[in-house]
Image (cartoon, rainbow, N blue to C red):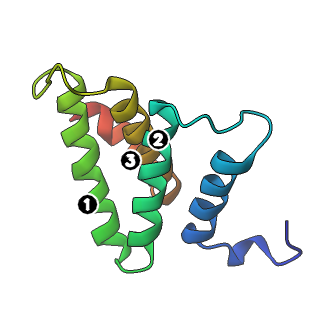
């Protein structure tokens, strides 16, 4: 924790903290299962993009990704080879970050 004003926290810092916690906490230790892998991969991807994209580009990219994964999970693009836990975790992680940027994203996703 820092003594800096909370107003100075960037989205990339929040993502970095979530990723660090996932990989190194002792409360729920990293075991590398598919659910953890989905969360890790989503956070790493978003962290990389957070440094390169505008807010609009970032939201549009990840809203589209969540919609694509939603269709896959619902079985429209489902394959027996897919790993549901991985994709569900990946999608849930994307939604959790998108909701930090624009809380309405959490609800808009349910209507699409």
Question: SS for tag 3?
Answer: helix
Tell me: 19 left or right of 3: left
- 31 versus 51 height, above or below: above
From the top left corner, tell me how far across and down residue 103 is, in percent: 48, 49
Label 3 sits on residue: 105
Q: Nearer the viewer, mark 2 or mark 1?
A: 2
Q: Nearer the viewer, mark 1 or mark 3?
A: 1
Q: Quadrant of residue 29?
A: top right
Q: Residues within 10 Å of mark 1 (few under 14, many from 20)?
A: some
Label 1 sits on residue: 61
Residue shown at 65% from the left, 49% from the top: 23
Tell me: 75 left or right of 69: left
Label 2 sits on residue: 37
Give the mark nearest the N terminus, 2 or 3. 2
Residue shown at 54% from the left, 37% from the top: 32
From the top left corner, tell me how far across and down residue 57 is, in percent: 28, 70
Q: Are marks 2 and 1 in contact (CB under 8 Å)?
A: no
CA–CA distance in space, label 1 to label 3: 13 Å
């Amino acid at each position: 924790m820092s003594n800096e004003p909370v107003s100075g926290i960037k989205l990339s810092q929040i993502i970095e903290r979530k990723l660090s916690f996932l990989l190194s906490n002792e409360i729920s230790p990293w075991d590398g299962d598919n659910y953890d892998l989905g969360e890790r991969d989503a956070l790493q991807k978003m962290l990389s993009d957070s440094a390169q994209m505008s807010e609009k580009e970032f939201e549009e990219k990840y809203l589209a990704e969540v919609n694509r994964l939603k269709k896959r999970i619902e079985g429209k693009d489902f394959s027996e080879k897919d790993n549901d836990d991985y994709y569900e975790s990946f999608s849930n992680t994307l939604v959790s970050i998108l909701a930090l940027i624009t809380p309405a994203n959490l609800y808009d996703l349910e209507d699409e």
